[in-house]
Image (cartoon, grey):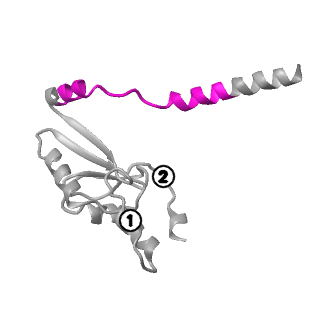
Amino acid sequence: QAWGETFISELHDTHVEAALRTMHIPPKLNILDVNESYKMSKSRLIVMGYNATLTTSAPAQPHQHRQFDQIRTLTQISAEVKNFINTIISQPGTEVLVVSGSERYKLERIFEGVNVWLAAENGVFLKPPFKEWEMVVENINLEWMES
């Protein structure tokens, strides 16, 4: 009897865990509906994640600083991606926001000359195109970052 109760309890826990995992998966979008809505809209905001979305994967380099060079390559965007972003931005009424956990200076350097909004350090800082950074969260103490 104890074995049966344990089995049922474990089975129940497994079912609950599986339900929690699948609960966070958004439904697939109907591409035709998205395309039609995009064409009909007068203003659009395209939000893009930076790390591992706009960046490219890089094979390991065969020399001593391999890991550093691979990370540096992984945090760059290709000219092709910049061209795609510029094509999107060129459409009237379209804004692009790139969200990242990266530091402000890195995003600013990477997207220099590209007419996009930037959200750095997980959304703490926001930079409109060709303007200065703004702190989104008020009364935040950043002294710990200097140590």
Relative horizontal placement of residue 73, taking residue 42 as reference (left or right):
right
Along the viewing direction, whichever of 65 and 103 lies nearer the viewer: 65
**Residue ID at (67%, 29%):** 14
Q: Is residue 41 above or below residue 136?
A: above
Within-10-Å neighbours for mark 2: few <14, some 14–19, many 20+: few
Depth check, front residue: 132 or 83: 83
SS at mark 2? loop
Instruction: State which region is magenta.
Output: 14-38
Residue type indicated by callout 1: Pro
Residue 104 horizontal side relative to residue 95, left or right: right
Residue that label 1 marks: 59
Q: Position of residue 28 (x, y in %)?
A: 36, 28
The image shows residue 23 at horizontal and vertical percentages of 52, 27
**Where is 125 relative to 72, above or below?**
above
Query: Alpha carbon of mark 2 to alpha carbon of mark 1: how far?
Result: 42 Å
Q: Eyeballing the image, is 102 above or below 96?
A: below
Give the quarter of the figure containing the N terminus.
Answer: top right
In terms of depth relative to the viewer, which is nearer, 7 or 70?
A: 7
Identify which residue is drawn at 44% across, 74% down.
66
Determine the image quadrant of residue 130: bottom left
Q: Quadrant of the C terminus?
A: bottom right
* Residue 39: x %, y % from top left: 14, 29
Label annotation for residue 139: 2
